[in-house]
Image (tube, helix red, strand yellow):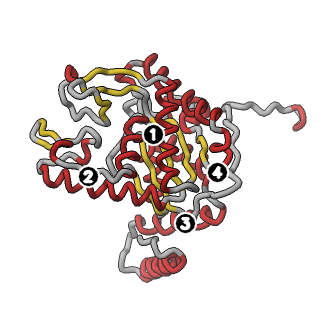
Amino acid sequence: MSRSDRVVMKLQTKIPLEKQPNNLIDYNSKILLLGSCFAENISEKLEYFKFQNTINPFGILFHPKAVERLIANAINEKEYSEKDVFFHDERWHCFDAHSVLSNTSKEQLLLNLNSNIKLTYKQIHESTHIIITLGTAWVYRFIENNQIVTNCHKVPQKQFKKEILTVDEIASSIESIERKIRLVNANVQIIYTVSPVRHLKNGFVLNQQSKSHLITAIHNFFNHNSEIQNRNSFYFPSYEIMMDELRDYRFYAEDMLHPNKTAINYIWEKFKQVWISQDASTIIDEVESIQKGLLHKPFNPNSNSHKQFLKNIESKKAQIHKQFPHIIF
């Protein structure tokens, strides 16, 4: 068979991605990530490569209303008090925050809530890029006050009403998020994505309904606000990459719900392709070289070759720190 007669088999469908023309992320950018646990995965990558990023000051936020509430409370400079917290299962909790902030001390919880709400306001005000990852359209409404909560904190389920946000409700929430953020930071780039993590406690069909509501709402918002999308609001297809390009269980962790390390690395590479500047990509390679060097375990720590190896790493660290003082290893 001649070379011209050979058929190249395509074993994967590729989602077309184009690099953003302006306002790419570089090492001078300040990035705020809010939302589902997939935001934590991307933040870990940004942290490893020494970008300036802040992730979920109030812990993981699974649904759009939780993101909206945090942004509203931050911009309104809410001050948390005793009426905002409650005691359950030997710890103090707040329905606005993830259990990672819960504490055995009420005073410490309030201190952390108020400190982190100020941090959130600061980051919204200063960020060049805000990445919002929506995880689910399912929410829990606390029956006692009819409020949708960010986290149930294992309070008995009979005290909540479970419901799914409609497409219109989610689109309205996104519009509120946009409006509030741009009141204090008009030019920030906002990147929306839908988490590829499956929320299967609601079942397969209802998980898919939830993701569909999120995706449809984001695109409905963009379609009705084309001038915003064209300027500085964007969609990155994390969910679609996982569902189409990585259509195989070998890309899931053992729980069959979360993307595994290979999948996270793959989606990160796609994100880099679209959102990371070329200059920053060069620094990424240098940072990775240092990070790998720091993890290196020598056979003989006292050898001259290893001492020279460490000296070279220190030299590289100093060069990068001189160029970007915030980068500290």
Kind of residue sitting beneath label 2: Glu
Which structural element holds mark 4?
helix
Query: What SS does tag 2 mark?
Result: loop
**What is the C-alpha distance between the residues marked 4 and 3?**
16 Å
Question: Which label belongs to residue 27?
Answer: 3
Q: Is residue 246 left or right of residue 40?
A: right
Q: To which quarter of the image does residue 281 belong?
A: bottom right
Tag 1 or tag 3, which sits nearer the N-term?
3
Task: Nearest to the eye among marks 1 and 2: give it.
Answer: 2
Looking at the image, can residue 187 be seen? yes
The quadrant of the picture occupied by the C terminus is bottom left
Q: Position of residue 39 (x, y in %)?
A: 44, 45
The residue indicated by pointer 1 is: 260
* Cα–Cα span, label 1 and label 2: 38 Å
Q: Which residue is mark 2?
A: 79
**In this picture, residue 161 sits left or right of residue 15:** left
Q: Which residue is mark 4?
A: 273
